[in-house]
Image: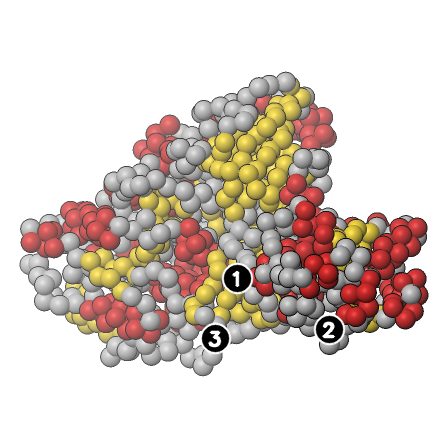
């Protein structure tokens, strides 16, 4: 007799377990769930009345209640007595809340079973005691393992039809364990049950005194599947850019792992752009911390380019960013997977065109053996190399289900045709994105053993900039420091040969030099730039391109009289004759620096002494 | 005495902190709602005025804060809603600052379709299902939120969060997209659409506990009050206006009743109850031995009636 539950404890203290039931067709999955709902008092009186009526019409249990009819909701399913689709059921006990995915046994619905497994933390694998371990049992166990389920119950059902025999149970368990050992489950708990009569489902069976393990409900209420997502690296896929007005730019999304606080230094995985978290905004007020599972809106200190699909992470916890990776793919469409065909991949909040470049092997789910193959047919699983059109942030699926999983979509029909679990990123020489993005300036600098810097020599033509720069480069090179010389004349023969000496062209000349110098510093190199660069504004422009402390302005302060006397290229003479226009110091101004890091007077001290002073400065500021 | 719609229904002065369970549900729903705003050109939120719609709208306000809802609400009005519901609807739209579209199937109205003369089945078909399809087509919506929950009914338990509808709004349960992880496939072609159910994993009790915790206004009809009803075949039908004729032998009587589920008034049966506050409702629910759809006259015709209606385009 059922007693009406008067008190359901407050849900607040309870944890949630999402699990699925799977196994071969007719193993009694729906019956088991119906039994669980019934025994935990989740069937309402009017539903029970409907059930009794339906049992007479469609039931397979004679005059008794057919619990399967509680969950087989679609008309086609009732007529055929099978479960076509995944049904989600909810029930609650004093200890836990449960979401059960009831998944199909028939082979053509294996994809639905995988769907149920993708959102579950534990699995109940049913085996018909009369039939033992079947192909579908193995397939479903493998899919559970592949989708990251760590804890399973092997429920040997219909044991009543085998006289509640311990020998039958033990033989099946032995078969199962022999197969499942290779799957790597953290725990496998075999339980003999009768879903129809309720033996060992929620109450211990009087028919099986030989069994001393937990009932199914005991296990469901106590299995520990908690993975502390908040302790993992921060992954915040940006779902929606929240821009109510020009003063607010927030990034809305759900933390799939990790935690974040205002002030944390964050980085956009794919662009490596950095900023700090300013606020964690919610409708209920700003938060001091957001943790895995929470849906929030982040604002940042800086205006950096972030769009839907980007992954925000902590600078110290970056995911791999790559356009090539290896993954297990489950094919879910009638039309076979073809290598090199373009599909649309969804990973996190990003859609990106993708191809499977190589099917390395297929997996025989009965034996777990690797088979050669050219394509993947419906319900087949293959280990593949995947290539995406642009680099994406990834984690191995075993580390993070959200950033390690993807689906593939047919570009014409938009059907979901494949599901993938990433194993690892592939490092390829041709993979420019990966090189650009995941090895940064600091990493390059580290292997060089010195910091990058720009030594910017400014001064009049003939002041001795190149002479001093040459001496310094020789000395640095002798000490094993990676250098490169950017010289005005050399650049004007190549990169800047389209530029003349008008003010506009001088500005553009310096802008290009600045950008080139920036690339070299990004490469970790000490760049020596020797340019008259007469205008303060352009020197400042280059300074601002560089990181703090990287730009070292060296004013080679040689009086124009001395320069004209030296005139190593005969330019002053030609300028005075009017053969060269816009010559600095003659008919174009030179703006001396106001706050150069170093000023040298090599016409007094000599070039060697000037170079020594500059080297002292580099040591003092620990560039070298 | 009925309460005004926006009077705080709970004794609690401020929202109580949410339980971990409700926070989990809230975050999941917010993610689903944001997903639609990010991926679809013309989404709309179906607003039925009931408790589920109230929670869904509240979640949407949270999802986009500090932005306003980036889509309108749509109410398909059968012209047979309780008067309290219409009042509540207009006040809510004002309170949340959302654009409210109201659609009536004028063609059905002109044909004189109504729940009393035409029967519940035809009325629902023309004034709800057909009306909804016409409204979606008229405004060109490509995604529509609905407040349905998987715990409501068997065919709903198999519904996707993102439910694909072929051109003509057809739902084919055999041709739904597998929904793995949280990787919803939002891609559709011209003429196709998606129905989105952010409350899929909520139960009726969750809805009420959240409503209480967040102080979400609900239609006063959910609270017990003396109301004019007729007893028809064991079901208590409220006479919201004089369009409901009394059958021979029937008499209007005043009973203290409330509604667990709200629809068109001649199609929603009341239950006798003393639950005057949200706390009372939650206590009553916990002791309840009947499902909420029991009072919905449209579901009882045949076991698979919901699936049939869904195939035709009902929510």
Lower position in the chain sequence, tag 1 or tag 2: 1
- Mark 3–mark 2 Cα distance, whole angstroms, equals 63 Å
Are the two marked residues, 3 and 2, in contact with CB atoms closer than 8 angstroms?
Answer: no
Question: In this view, which residue lies farthest toward the bottom?
Answer: B13
- Percent coordinates x, y for residue A120 in the rendering: 57, 44
Kindly identify the residue that appears in the image at 41 percent across and 58 percent down: B204
- Which residue is labeled 3 in the image? B15
Question: In this view, which residue lies farthest toward the front?
Answer: A577
Kindly identify the residue that appears in the image at 85 percent across and 70 percent down: A600
Kindly identify the residue that appears in the image at 59 percent across and 61 percent down: A502
Q: How many marks?
A: 3
Q: Element under label 3?
A: loop
Q: Mark 3 lies on which chain?
A: B
Kindly identify the residue that appears in the image at 30 percent across and 61 percent down: B73
**Front residue of A25 and A455:** A455
- Percent coordinates x, y for residue A326 in the rendering: 65, 34
- Mark 1–mark 3 Cα distance, whole angstroms, equals 26 Å
**Front residue of A233 and A614:** A614
Residue A314 vertical position relative to residue A353 in the rendered view, above or below: below
- Which residue is labeled 1 in the image? A251
**Front residue of B244 and A160:** B244
Category of crowding for the residue at label 3, using alpha-carbon neighbours closer than 10 angstroms: few (below 14), some (14–19), many (at least 20): some
Residue B127 vertical position relative to residue B62 in the rendered view, above or below: above
User: Residue B67, located in which quarter of the rendered image?
Assistant: bottom left
Q: Is residue B74 rendered to the left or right of residue B105? A: right
- Percent coordinates x, y for residue A496 in the rendering: 63, 50
Are the two marked residues, 1 and 2, in contact with CB atoms closer than 8 angstroms?
Answer: no
Are the numbered discs 3 and 2 placed on the same chain, yes or no?
no
- Which residue is labeled 2 in the image? A593
**Front residue of A523 and A105:** A523
- Mark 1–mark 2 Cα distance, whole angstroms, equals 43 Å
Q: Is residue A497 rendered to the left or right of residue B78? A: right
């Amino acid at each position: 007799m059922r007693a009406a539950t008067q008190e359901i404890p407050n849900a607040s203290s309870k944890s949630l377990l999402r699990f699925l039931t799977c196994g071969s067709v007719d193993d009694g999955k729906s019956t088991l769930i119906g039994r669980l709902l019934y025994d935990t008092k989740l069937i309402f009186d009017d539903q029970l009345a409907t059930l009794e009526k339906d049992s007479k019409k469609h039931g397979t249990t004679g005059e008794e209640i057919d619990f399967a009819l509680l969950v087989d909701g679609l008309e086609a399913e009732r007529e055929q007595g099978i479960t076509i689709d995944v049904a989600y059921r909810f029930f609650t006990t004093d200890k836990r809340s449960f979401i059960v995915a009831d998944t199909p046994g028939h082979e053509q619905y294996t994809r639905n079973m995988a769907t149920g497994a993708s959102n579950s933390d534990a699995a109940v694998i049913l085996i018909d005691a009369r039939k033992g371990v079947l192909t579908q049992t193995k397939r479903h166990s493998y899919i559970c393992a592949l989708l990251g389920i760590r804890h399973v119950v092997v429920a040997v059902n219909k044991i009543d039809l085998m006289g509640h025999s311990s020998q039958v149970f033990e033989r099946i368990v032995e078969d199962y364990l022999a197969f499942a050992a290779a799957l790597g489950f953290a725990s496998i708990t075999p339980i003999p049950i009768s879903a129809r009569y309720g033996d060992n489902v929620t109450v211990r069976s009087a028919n099986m005194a030989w069994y001393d393990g937990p009932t199914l409900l005991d296990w469901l209420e106590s299995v520990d599947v908690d993975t502390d997502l908040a302790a993992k690296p921060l992954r915040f896929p940006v779902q929606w850019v929240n821009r109510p007005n020009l003063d607010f730019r927030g990034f809305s999304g759900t933390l799939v792992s990790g935690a974040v606080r205002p002030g944390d230094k964050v980085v956009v995985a794919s662009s490596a752009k950095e900023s700090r978290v300013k606020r964690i905004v919610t409708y209920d007020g700003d938060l001091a911390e957001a943790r895995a599972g929470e849906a929030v809106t982040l604002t940042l200190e800086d205006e950096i380019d972030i769009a839907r699909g980007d992954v925000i992470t902590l600078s110290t916890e970056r995911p791999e960013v790559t356009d090539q990776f290896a993954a297990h793919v489950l094919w879910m469409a009638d039309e076979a997977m073809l290598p090199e065909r373009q599909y649309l991949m969804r990973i996190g909040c990003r859609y990106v065109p993708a191809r499977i470049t190589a099917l390395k092997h297929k997996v025989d789910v009965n034996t777990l053996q690797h088979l050669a193959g050219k394509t993947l047919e419906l319900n087949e699983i293959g280990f593949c190399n995947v290539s995406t059109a642009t680099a994406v942030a990834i984690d191995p699926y075993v580390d993070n289900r959200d950033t390690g999983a993807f689906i593939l979509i047919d570009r014409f029909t938009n059907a979901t045709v494949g599901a993938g679990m990433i194993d690892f990123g592939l490092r390829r020489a041709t993979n420019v994105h990966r090189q650009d993005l995941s090895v940064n300036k600091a990493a390059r600098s580290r292997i060089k053993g010195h910091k990058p810097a720009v030594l910017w020599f400014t001064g009049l033509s003939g002041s001795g900039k190149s002479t001093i720069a040459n001496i310094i480069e020789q000395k640095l090179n002798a000490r094993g420091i990676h250098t490169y010389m950017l010289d005005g004349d050399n650049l004007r023969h190549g990169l800047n040969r389209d530029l003349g000496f008008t003010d506009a062209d001088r500005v553009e000349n310096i802008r290009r030099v600045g950008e080139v110098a920036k690339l070299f510093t990004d490469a970790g190199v000490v760049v020596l730039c020797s340019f008259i660069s007469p205008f303060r504004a352009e020197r400042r422009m280059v300074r601002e391109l560089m990181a703090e402390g990287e730009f070292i302005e060296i004013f080679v302060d040689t009086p124009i009289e001395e320069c004209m006397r030296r005139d190593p290229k005969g330019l002053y003479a030609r300028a005075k004759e009017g053969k060269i226009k816009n010559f600095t110091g003659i008919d174009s101004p030179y703006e001396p620096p106001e706050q150069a890091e170093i000023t040298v007077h090599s016409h007094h001290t000599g070039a060697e002494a000037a170079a020594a002073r500059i080297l002292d400065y580099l040591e003092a500021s620990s560039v070298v | 005495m009925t309460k005004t719609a926006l009077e705080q229904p709970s004794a609690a002065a401020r929202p109580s902190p949410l339980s971990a369970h409700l926070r989990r549900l809230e975050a999941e729903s917010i993610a689903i709602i944001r997903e639609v705003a990010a991926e679809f050109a013309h989404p709309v939120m179906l607003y039925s005025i009931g408790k589920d719609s109230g929670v869904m709208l509240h979640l949407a306000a949270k999802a986009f804060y500090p932005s306003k809802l980036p889509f309108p609400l749509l109410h398909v009005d059968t012209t047979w809603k309780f008067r309290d519901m219409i009042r509540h609807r207009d006040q809510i739209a004002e309170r949340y600052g959302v654009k409210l579209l109201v659609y009536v199937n004028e063609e059905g109205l002109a044909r004189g379709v109504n729940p009393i003369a035409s029967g519940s089945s035809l009325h629902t078909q023309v004034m709800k299902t057909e009306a909804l399809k016409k409204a979606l087509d008229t405004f060109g919506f490509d995604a529509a939120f609905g407040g349905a929950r998987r715990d409501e009914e068997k065919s709903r338990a198999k519904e996707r969060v993102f439910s694909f509808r072929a051109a003509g709004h057809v739902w084919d349960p055999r041709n739904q997209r597998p929904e793995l992880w949280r990787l919803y496939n939002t891609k559709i072609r011209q003429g196709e659409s998606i129905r989105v159910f952010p409350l899929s994993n909520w139960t009726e009790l969750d809805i009420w506990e959240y409503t209480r915790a967040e102080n979400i206004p609900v239609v006063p009809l959910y609270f017990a009050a003396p109301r004019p009803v007729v007893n028809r075949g064991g079901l208590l039908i409220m006479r919201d206006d004089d369009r409901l004729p009394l059958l021979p032998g029937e008499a209007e009587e005043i009973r203290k009743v409330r509604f667990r589920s709200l629809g068109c008034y001649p199609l929603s049966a009341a239950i006798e109850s003393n639950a005057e506050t949200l706390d009372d409702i939650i206590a009553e629910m916990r002791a309840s031995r009947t499902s909420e759809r029991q009072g919905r006259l449209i579901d009882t015709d045949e076991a698979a009636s919901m699936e049939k209606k869904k195939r035709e385009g009902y929510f």
